Amino acid sequence: MDSCPNCSSERYIKAGVVKNRQRYKCKSCGYFFTVGKLGKQIDDYYVNKALQLYLEGLTYREIERILGVSHVSVMNWVRKYNIKRPYNSKYHPTYKILNQSELQQYFQNSDNITGAGVLVTELGDKFMLIKWERFRE
Ligand SMILES: [Zn+2]
């Protein structure tokens, strides 16, 4: 894959996985397209993101919904890389998926960030915000 099928631009970014196919978004025209079958060879990017989310306390099903990779794949990666979560899973994070301007608005409201840990991670063309409220009574 070297250009957008809509406008032939070579500027595109990863924008999720749909049915095991890498999806891209053209930065020039905004067109979404998928290429090839990834099969078992899903990009490392998603392996890393999935394991990251797993460590943040998300369930396999949540990770499946967010990344578009099957929960079975995620379970396999967790096993393969021998990822262990800390024993205490009492705190379940809440999360939102926001674009850049929504993210700015979110941080402008101090109520959103007071008394909670917030972690922002890139997710395709958006950002995922994971919020911990463990210090709130
Ligand atoms: Zn394009």
Image (cartoon, grey):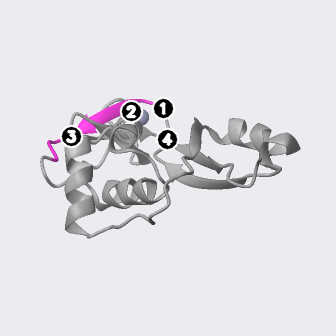
Q: Residues within 10 Å of mark 4 (few under 14, many from 20)?
A: some
Left or right: where 114 falls relative to 60: right
Answer whether residue 109 is visible to the viewer in this image.
no
Say whether residue 34 is magenta: yes
Residue 2: horizontal and vertical position, in percent? 28, 49
Q: Nearer the viewer, mark 4 or mark 2?
A: 4
Q: In front here: 41 or 114?
A: 114
Q: Which residue is mark 2?
A: 7
Q: Quadrant of residue 43?
A: bottom left
CB of mark 4 near ligand 1 (< 8 Å): yes
Q: Residues within 10 Å of mark 3 (few under 14, many from 20)?
A: some
Q: Residues within 10 Å of mark 2 (few under 14, many from 20)?
A: few
Mark 4 touches mark 2? (CB < 8 Å): no
Mark 1 touches mark 2? (CB < 8 Å): yes
Mark 3 touches mark 4? (CB < 8 Å): no
Left or right: where 93 falls relative to 136: left
Q: Residue at x 61, y 46 (%)?
A: 129
Q: Amino acid at mark 1?
A: Cys
Q: Which residue is mark 3?
A: 20
Residue at disc 2, secondary structure: loop
Q: Which residue is mark 4?
A: 27
Left or right: where 79 falls relative to 107: left
